[in-house]
Image (cartoon, grey):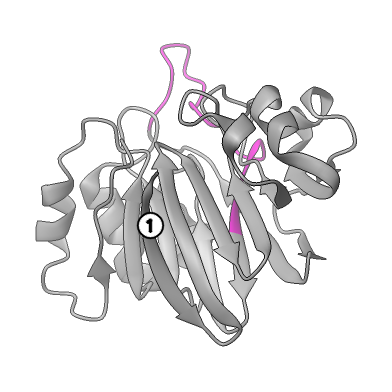
Amino acid sequence: MFETDVVKTSVGELKISFVGHGTLQFALGDAVIHVDPVSREADYTRMPKADLVLITHEHGDHLDADAIAAVRAKDTVVILTERCAAAVPGSTVMKNGDVRTVAGLKVEAVPAYNVVHKRPSGEPFHPRGNGNGYVITFGDTRVYVAGDTENIPEMKQLKDVDVAFLPMNLPYTMTPAMVADAARAFRPKVLYPYHFGKTNTAELTRLLAGEKSIEVRIRKME
């Protein structure tokens, strides 16, 4: 139903489904992880139940209580930010810097915020402390889903990231140059731009053409 890639890890094959925009699904063995499930991207009544749901922040293209309810089972763990908690009773809040082990997976909450891009009022589109990115560890493979953010210092300090999803649309997140700057700093082995709207993804590919250790993969994640 969706484009999929398979990444080999020390604990089996990780299947990545590119649902759309900021929405992803990971499957490893019998475990299913939904990231920012949103009904406009898929019919979640037909999607597999989740062991883990990760919500990056409270905006409507990332937080959809109905989609979460559709994939939630008795033992599903929903991890989200404090600003999302009221919309999803019984969820678990992770703050920037928190680390938890959930469903046998290490999950790290990474800051996600804007510095440059702001609303006419002067407030950042994504204020510091409101949103999370997440690093999920599958065996020996670290996957970073950045959420809505710019190329912030905390991102550049990440280590040993195998697969990264970085947002790339203006005015809300990053330009291709900002994504390339971040990628050169923390050097993921595979880089997927996502949440990119009408941004020219070929520009990112061009900017990173000389970085042979970073593989840029473009999927349908407008």
Tell whether position 107 is magenta: no
Q: Nearer the viewer, residue 99 or 143?
A: 143
Indicate the position of residue 14 as horizontal and vertical percent values. Answer: 51, 70
Residue shown at 22% from the left, 47% from the top? 176
Q: As drawn, is 74 to the left or to the right of 182? A: right
Q: Which residue: 80% across, 64% down?
A: 100
Q: Magenta residues, as a range?
A: 117-134
Name the residue furthest bottom: 10
The residue identified by callout 1 is 4
Residue 129 falls within the magenta-colored stretch: yes
Crowding near the residue tagged with mark 1, few <14, some 14–19, many ≥20 C-alpha atoms within 10 Å: few
Residue 147, given in percent of the width and then of the height, sits at 51, 44
Say which residue appears at 78% left-offset and 64% top-offset.
103
> At which x and y percent is residue 105?
72, 69
Image height of 120 relative to 144, above or below? above
Residue plotted at (67% across, 66% down): 30
Left or right of 84, for residue 219: left
Asked whether, in this view, residue 202 is left or right of residue 22, the answer is: left
Is residue 222 or residue 206 the one in the foreground?
222
Q: How many marks?
A: 1
Front residue of 184/193: it is 193
Q: Main secondary structure of the magenta part?
A: loop
Check disc 1 and give the amino acid type: Thr
Measured from the top left, where is residue 3 in percent x and y? Answer: 34, 51
Residue 158 visible? The answer is no
- Whether residue 65 is visible: yes
The answer to which of 110 and 19 lies nearer the viewer is: 19
SS at mark 1 in the image? strand
- Of the 4 image quadrants, the one containing the N terminus is top left
Q: Quadrant of residue 71?
A: top right
Residue 206: quadrant of the picture: bottom left
